[in-house]
Amino acid sequence: MTEIEIDKRHTVLKFSFSKRVLPQETEGTIERVRTLLFDLQPGFSMCTDLTMLEFMDPGCAKHIERTMDLCREAGVSKVVRVIPDPKKDIGFSIMSLFHYDRSVQVVTCETMKEAEQVLGMLES
């Protein structure tokens, strides 16, 4: 399952992958992301939560890479990933090297609370 939403207050494009994710599902997210990016200005952040991910088919990679490219082109400045189990990093770190330039800050967190701190979403 894939969920995508925008937190307009904090200018964050949020992805959540859970259970089993198949290529036809990630292919369908590309147009949704393209549409949501119209509501964000360059300098936005992106958060990807893999906490509940059980399995992602390798065929999803090409769609995720395209999504990364769309976000780079739209001006993403920070990418935060929630990966509580390093075995769940199904290539996101390697793909980042090829699909984001050096100006994009990439941070991996173990919990959503940690990610929210990095993204400035927690009230002080």
Image (cartoon, helix red, strand yellow):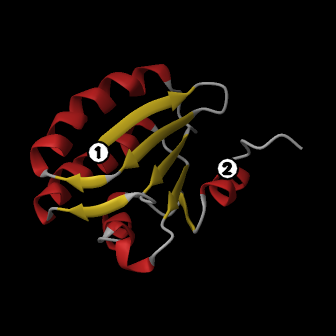
- Which element is circle 1 on? helix
Amino acid tagged 1: Thr
**Residue at 60% across / 62% down in the picture?**
111
Quarter assignment of residue 123: top right
- Which element is circle 2 on? helix
* Residue 118 or residue 111, whichever sits in front: 111
Q: CA distance from mark 1 to mark 2?
A: 22 Å
Instruction: Choose the circle earlier in sequence order: 1 or 2.
Output: 1
**Residue at 66% across / 33% down in the picture?**
10
Seen in the picture, residue 73 relative to 11 is either above or below; the reply is: below
Reading the image, the residue beneath label 1 is: 67
How far across and down, in percent of the image, does residue 119 sit? 67, 48
* Residue 17 or residue 76, whichever sits in front: 17
Figure quadrant of the C terminus: top right
Reading the image, the residue beneath label 2 is: 116
Alpha-carbon neighbours of circle 1 within 10 Å: few (<14), some, or many (≥20)? many
Which of label 1 and label 2 is nearer to you? 2
